[in-house]
Image (spheres, grey):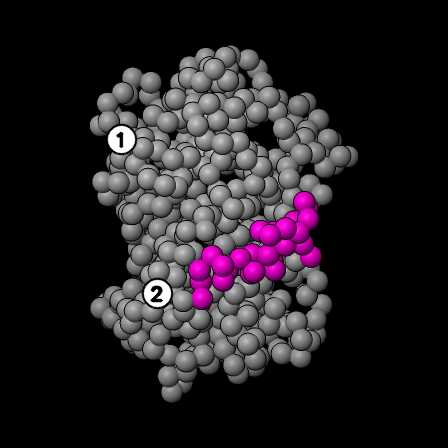
Amino acid sequence: MIDSFDYVVIGAGSAGCVMANRLSADGVTSVALLEAGARDWNPWIHVPVGYFKTIHNPATDWCYETEPDPGLNGRSLKWPRGKVLGGSSSINGLLYVRGQHQDYDRWAELGCSGWSYDEVLPFFKKSENQSRGESQYHGSGGPLHVSDMSFRREICDDFIKGVAELGTPISDDNNAADQEGVGYFQLTAHNGRRCSSAAAYLKTAKDRPNLTILTHAMAERIGFENGRAHTVQINHKNVPRTLKANREIILCGGAVNSPQLLQLSGIGPGQLLQDHGIDVVVDSPDVGSNLQDHLQIRTVYKTTQANTLNDELSNSWQKMRAGITYLTKRSGPLSMAASQVYAFCRTRLSNNRPDIQYHFQPLSADSPGEGLHPFSAITASVCQLRPESRGSITIKSNDPNDHPRITPNYLSTELDCQTAVESIRHARQVMATSAMRQHIKEEYVPDPRAQSDDELLNQAREISNTIYHPVGTCRMGADSKSVLDNELRVRGVAGLRVVDASVMPEIVSGNTNAPTIMIAERASDFILR
Ligand SMILES: Cc1cc2nc3c(=O)[nH]c(=O)nc-3n(C[C@H](O)[C@H](O)[C@H](O)COP(=O)(O)OP(=O)(O)OC[C@H]3O[C@@H](n4cnc5c(N)ncnc54)[C@H](O)[C@@H]3O)c2cc1C
């Protein structure tokens, strides 16, 4: 059976939901939105703290794992990616961060004309419904709700003061003129509920007669005719189907799945494709390369008082009370995002702009998504904002159901290693400030005995984790080796674009959801123009 549409959008994540909404907005253009996962009916998706239930859960997460990484002393990491309407925006930490102006100006410098900060700002604003109202840097009236968190507590306030003692200014908006500063995050949330890309962009569009949303619809291959992408083979609820795109196919599968599907469809490194018996449509060596991610070093400190979430959620009665508070007031611990306080700071390795970011949490666990520790403790996670290490995504076979090989190559350059060492030292300095030291009983992670650069680097290799920001694997650019041109069209064929986090030529200095939504706003503008 062949169904035909003007546009077929593959993947209903942060970017795909934007594309489906904007392209079908005229009520006439027919759009099919394909999502491999389910509808977002799971109630935990909508509760901010619900990521504890949705990550590492095969009902909502692809449950990827990286290859053993030499930079992490051979450890492999779990790499959650949303597999549900809303994609990773349905399971993420809700933090609304855009990065630095210089990130986008750098994209333009690299040859991505049309992507400088001044050119992308209108698209951040277009997407946004900022609860503080419209301003030079913020939009109101857009689909994506951005609001302040209701959660404040003394130990978070003291962390802010501690970072400020070391010279970073206190700020209330890291998305304005200058990112540098420390303060409470803003969230993609509305009235205590998550505002995923699906909640923002599909809620109002889903009943349009010209928009068809298929869940449990896994795209397995893109088909080409005379150099033009024109069909998508899918497995829809275990039934093979073919969808035809009269105008364009738009791949929004995210930084892992988009290069995977291109490679399965014959666009990628020629030798790799041949090794797996795939006919080469375009020999495009960079498909799947240029993988970048933020690596978080989660430092954990035991506290002197029972004033952390570890204490407040330590038994069933307290958890039930938190549930009731959430249901009756939409506040309390369940309304919390993954982190509460940001700090964008400069280490001595950075000359003129922040090179590390803190995610501060008044709680601790062995790793994200696992049970809280049975003692009072806080987490000051710190990551390098612009790592130089580069990895790759490559198929392991020509079976679309086989997870691809994920090779991040963390901590594989000198700067990244030095920044990891500086990050741990910086966290220790914060904990020693007059604002914070009253709270600190002892350092739990890293090992307090680690003091030399080598020992600290080894600790970083042992304890760090992804902060879930893979990007760059289908980079755009002006050079002929880039996978996409600057309007995100796949080089070498017609009728195919990639629109998601994979298009970034370099990772932005911050969390990646808002930038990905901006990319999709920008792309839909290219197409509609
Ligand atoms: C646990 C976690 C926490 C995070 N926290 C934050 C945060 O607090 N703030 C922030 O800014 N960023 C955060 N991020 C990162 C951010 O959410 C992602 O960068 C962003 O959502 C990526 O958007 P995307 O459109 O590229 O991909 P995704 O949102 O992952 O969307 C891809 C979609 O395509 C679907 N798909 C893939 N392949 C196929 C196929 N073959 N057929 C059909 N459908 C397919 C997937 O199921 C998915 O729904 C977090 C991410 C995770 C996983």
Residue at the location (27% across, 20% down)? Answer: 451
- Say if mark 1 contacts mark 2, CB within 8 Å: no
Find residue 106 and report its horizontal and vertical position in percent: 37, 56
Residue at (73% x, 31% y) in the render: 324
Question: Who is closer to the viewer here, 12 or 112?
Answer: 112
Q: CA distance from mark 1 to mark 2?
A: 35 Å
Q: Which mark is residue 457?
A: 1
x, y percent for residue 2:
54, 81
| Magenta-colored span | 114-141
Which x, y percent locates residue 143?
Answer: 66, 57
Give me the residue at 56% from left, 26% from top. Answer: 156
Q: Is residue 35 magenta?
A: no
Residue 193 visible in this rendered orientation of the protein: no
The numbered disc on residue 411 is: none
- Tell whether 408 sits left or right of 440: left
Q: Is residue 286 left or right of residue 255?
A: left
Furthest-bottom residue in this view: 226
CA neighbours of label 1 inside 10 A, class few (<14), some (14 to 19), many (20+): many
Reading the image, the residue beneath label 2 is: 111
- As shown in the figure, which amino acid type bears the numbered disc 1? Leu
